[in-house]
Amino acid sequence: MTEADFTRKVNAILTKDYGVYCEKMFNPMRGGTPDCWYSKKGSPDVWVEFKYHKTLPVRGRDVGCSELQKRWLLARHEEGRKVFVVVGTPEGVAIYPVSFLKMTGWKCYSRDFEEGKNVSRIAADKLASFMKWSRLEG
């Protein structure tokens, strides 16, 4: 799976199962903008940068954000916005609030990963849980 595949699958689950509006971001004029913006009635907006690695980290490994991404994410966090980095692998998923990554030096650790086969489902459900988004009825 690629990062783009992972992002697309998570967005499809969030839209279908949770009724979340997902918008894929791309800004060739300004670097650092996260991959996706999410909106749901009654909930704050959320910005998410997705990363996909081939294996779980053995030791602390850089999550993979560029310096421009780090600056953008931290600036939005300092404005009080909800900002996360979602790190997926074939074996599991970790979701990091940017405030946590700032404290760890932007490192991810295997202990933080919820392991499982359907990593897109795990990522969507964990993100929904963080945001207290309820599943749609029916």
Image (spheres, grey):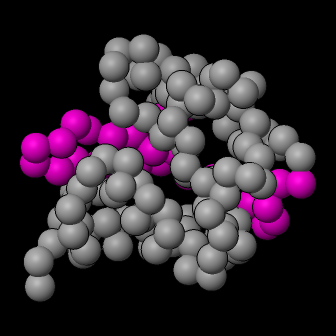
Q: Is residue 31 visible?
A: no
Residue range (magenta): 32-58
Q: Residue furthest bottom?
A: 138
Q: Is residue 44 magenta?
A: yes
Closer to the camera in the image, 90 or 112: 112
Relative to 56, is 117 above or below? Answer: below
Name the image quarter holding the C terminus: bottom left
**Picture coordinates of residue 53 (x, y %)?**
75, 60
Relative to 79, is 34 above or below? Answer: below
Query: How many numbered dots are placed on residues in this image?
Result: 0
> Along the horizontal axis of the image, is 125 left or right of 64?
left
The residue lying at 77 percent from left, 54 percent from top is 110
**Picture coordinates of residue 49 (x, y %)?**
52, 45
Q: Is residue 110 magenta?
A: no
Q: Residue furthest right?
A: 58
**Picture coordinates of residue 107 (x, y %)?**
75, 36
Relative to 123, is 58 above or below? Answer: above
The residue lying at 70 percent from left, 74 percent from top is 90
The residue lying at 10 percent from left, 48 percent from top is 41
Closer to the camera in the image, 48 or 113: 113
Q: Quadrant of residue 54?
A: bottom right
**Picture coordinates of residue 13 (x, y %)?**
35, 73
> Along the horizontal axis of the image, is 84 left or right of 39?
right
Closer to the camera in the image, 28 or 65: 65
Q: Is residue 111 visible?
A: yes
Q: Quadrant of residue 11?
A: bottom left
> Along the horizontal axis of the image, is 84 left or right of 101?
left
The residue lying at 55 percent from left, 68 percent from top is 6
Name the image quarter holding the N terminus: bottom right
